[in-house]
Image (tube, coloured by chain):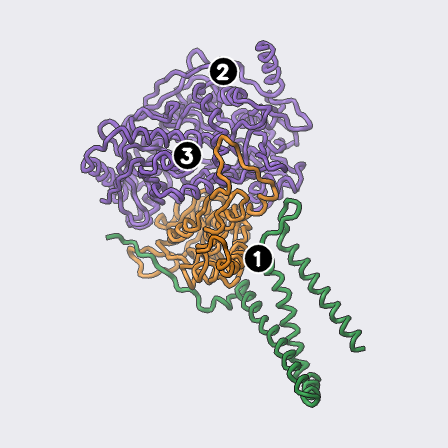
Chain colours: A green, B orange, C purple
Amino acid sequence: MSESRPYRRPIDPKWWWAPGPYRAYTLRELSGVAVALYGAVLFAGLICLVSGPMAWDSFLGFLRSPVSIVLHLVLLAGVVYHVKTWFETLPKTMPKMIVNGKQVPATEITRKAQMVAAGCSLVLVVIAAWAFR
Amino acid sequence: MPDVALAAKTVQLKVLRYRPGQDAEPSYGTFEVPYTDDMSVLQALQTIKDELDSSLSFRWSCRMAVCGSCGMMINGTPKLACNTFLRNLPKGPVTVEPLNNFPIERDLVVSVGDFVKKIESIYPYIIPKTPKTVEEGPYLQTPAQMAAYESFSDCINCMLCYAACPQFGENPAFIGPGAMALLQRYNGDSRDGGQQKRLDTIHGEDGVWSCTAVGVCSEVCPKQVDPANAINQNKTNSAFDFFLRFVRKDAR
Amino acid sequence: MDHFDADVLIVGAGGAGLRAAIAVAEADPSLTVALVSKVLPMRSHTVAAEGGSAGVIQSTDSLEAHFHDTVAGGDWLCEQDVVEFFVSRSTPEMIQLEHWGCPWNRKPDGNINVRAFGGMKIERTWFAADRSGFHILHTLFQTSTKFPSIKRFDEYFCVDLIVDDGRAQGATVLSPVTGAFTAITARSVILATGGAGRVFRQNTNGGVVTGDGMALAYRHGVPLRDMEFMQYHPTCMPGTGLLFTEACRGEGGHLVNKDGYRYLQDYGLGPVTPEPRNKTMELGPRDRLSQAFWHESQKGRTFETPGGDAVWLDLRHLGAAKIKERLPLIREMAIEFMDIDPALGQIPVRPAVHYTMGGVPTDIRTATSLPGLYAAGECASSGIHGANRLGSNSLAELFVFGHVAGDEAVKFSRGVSASDSGKLIDQAKASAAKALSLRDQKGGGERHAVLRKEMALTMEKGCGIYRDAAGMQATCDKLAELKRRYREVTLEDKSAVWNTDWVTALELGYELDVAEAVAASALARRESRGAHQRLDGYENRDDAHFLAHSLATYREAAAPEISYGPVKITTSQPAVRAYGALGEALEAKKDAAHA
């Protein structure tokens, strides 16, 4: 009879909150909730719009309330964090980019993609500001 | 190697010990090891074995971070002991444990058999697109074609990525990052024609779909192989394959 | 005791062992191969080979040129028929590896690229960055998994061969995982266990390179050949001995002393040229470069480091991009181990033991003097390296002779029947009992770690780059003492599972036997040739007396007996071995004579 008796250590049930990259991963995934909530707010606005002017006015009233402004600031922070980390994850999910026989480094893909995203956001803000001037 | 008795400076190592013949479960052993500036964690362990306690077991060989033997948890992070230097670690005791997520056979030695089986399961060899005899000479492969798979071929099978992967911890049957990097190494090779065969091995929960893109596997990789990329690319491939199988010519 | 019956047993799963296993599986899939390795195959020391593997491929090159470089590089102690065979079979093996997926470096058009190497007239070193051995080993291991007839015994340690009826018929192996032994019986046995560099203190070798196969054959009456020729590689990390590949110089790196002077020009290797020139300066052979270092050190033109004196390896002029592309591992090692970015700073280097030129003598078809026993790779003395191996010939050797060994083992296995298995298993039981007794004996309190250090130190002292009779005699005496003390070893660890205390003690037994063969062979060779250089009145090559292979024969409890065997000369008569300007002049003269 062999003495061999491999021992399996239990995995840490709170691994997702372990400091460092694991916590960063959990925060990244959680920040996705902010994106969903933004979508829900927009969707609610749409429903109000089709329900008639009274509903629409009360929706606008809600948007101007301090609760809504605080909520939007929190959601904006969550979405910005999600956008930033989403593009950091992007190079891990796509085939290697080979340009002139050399692999494009992940950091460069992330940087360029983030710049494009920031540019697009800026254009949208400018268009919106122009439309509601 | 420095003499234990004469050493001016020492460092404390807290090593997780497990001797199945005598221990019911692992517990820490503490060693005072003479410290020099150029000392790796591996050298510290060798000093313990040679001069303090010869019953401490761990794997090692090349000492230069290419054979992949000496992966272990150092202060809680999976690292190669041979290229982790004491001078670069925070002051205070250094904790050394066997790699997370693997059964411990003894001390710092973990079971590697399952990992090797996973490597073997993904057809880790060229399945030639166009067979050729040696007399016909080498295949042509441009540097750009090589770049498509080259980084995945740098994997030294050290298993640090598995120790970093919580999903492998939860599901030991998960194919895991290292084997997926190897799969992508062959799937991305211009000489290879075995992509479909390999893809068929990675559908399902034990295939790519256990991965939730935590991504720490790529962060701990000592060779910048980026196994997270290999897995996530193949989620896309696996998903496409799921739908395309209905229209594929050779579909069963 | 467990018993496994195979047709072919291969001990060692590095480059040679894996190549042999695939050869057997391809030649006859009905034959069972037992492939035993004391580590996972991809941990084998082939993994650490950096620079590349030689094979003629350029249109300007020729098999004759590779032959002449090898024979002259070996100071004419090569078996010339074997070298002829080797150079002709090398390139097909490289192509085979390419077909199996080895990521050889390519030219822009997709063809194979080759680099310059020391002592080679024309660029013929195939390379995969500076991780050639790593890529080759993983390619071979992964390819081997496609053959179901290869039954691997990963992490099994070989404690003895089984020899019956005058031929090799298997081995007794120990599984550290359980502490249990297995008798593996087979019709033929291939040794592919690698070299013995760990018997020296500063060496480039992994912990596994302990001469196991050499000692196994040696104890069964097979002599060890040319063991005095231990190669010092000139560019290693002081202290650890880790290797900075010859490709550093192949790509154009310089060696300079503490005054910034390219000192090799003082040792018959000049002239200094703006561009690297083959067989000149830094592209001279390893023995000459290590010897030049020794002289520089004697002259006080080296500098001190905690790991011994050193010179500078200067890669800065290659530029960061080229270093990253061609020498990524070297760059990583310099940065991680020494905090030096080679694009910005010079790397301190000194010679360290790298390669065992000698080993188990084989004929051109890898057969040893024991029927049924074959040997390939560093553990073998096939005769291609002579007194000094050229860089990039050793990787090629693995595949050429691994392949042949596989083919020959198949033929032999088909032609013989097994002895009574009960008898073979009894022999295995006796070997197991002997190995167990080392673990369990009370002993006299000797610690094997202490003995190992003393062995490595005395080898370095007496059998270093330059040698004299007094030093070598002192080493022989010291080794005899260590062997006596080895019998008094007491292990602290008596357990069964993963008892590495026990396995390393068994390895030390192998190392001491091999070390003794090295020292005794060195003492007996009263001349200077290749890697064996003497200072005590034997400073020159003496073809009249020593154009001969040394053979060390094992004797129980006594120093080995040294005898000599002939060297096979075919087309290259021994001549002056010169590099640099003199070498070029002599070659021009020879070419003119031919014309």
- Amino acid type, label 2: Asn
Residue C593 placed where, x, y %? 58, 9
Residue B242 placed where, x, y %? 49, 60
| Discs 2 and 3 carry the same chain letter | yes
Is C173 placed left or right of C475 in the picture? left
- For mark 1, what is the residue? A92
Image quarter of residue A49: bottom right
> How far is the residue under mark 1 from the one under mark 3?
37 Å
Image position of B11 with respect to C243: above or below: below
- For mark 3, what is the residue? C16
| Discs 1 and 2 carry the same chain letter | no
Residue at (34% x, 20% y) in the render: C562
Q: Chain of mark 1?
A: A
Q: Residues within 10 Å of mark 2 (few under 14, many from 20)?
A: few
- Amino acid type, label 3: Ala
Q: Chain of mark 3?
A: C
- Please say whether residue A74 is visible from this viewpoint: yes
- Please say whether residue C558 is visible from this viewpoint: no
Q: Residues within 10 Å of mark 1 (few under 14, many from 20)?
A: many
Which of the two discs, 1 and 2, sits closer to the camera?
Answer: 1
Q: Residues within 10 Å of mark 3 (few under 14, many from 20)?
A: many
Q: Secondary structure at mark 2?
A: loop
The residue lying toward the viewer, choosing from A1 and C21, is: C21
Residue B220 placed where, x, y %? 52, 55
Q: Chain of mark 2?
A: C
The quadrant the C terminus of chain B occupies is bottom left
- Amino acid type, label 1: Lys
Image quarter of residue C21: top left
Q: Residue C540: which disc? A: 2
| Discs 1 and 3 carry the same chain letter | no
Image position of C500 with respect to C534: above or below: below
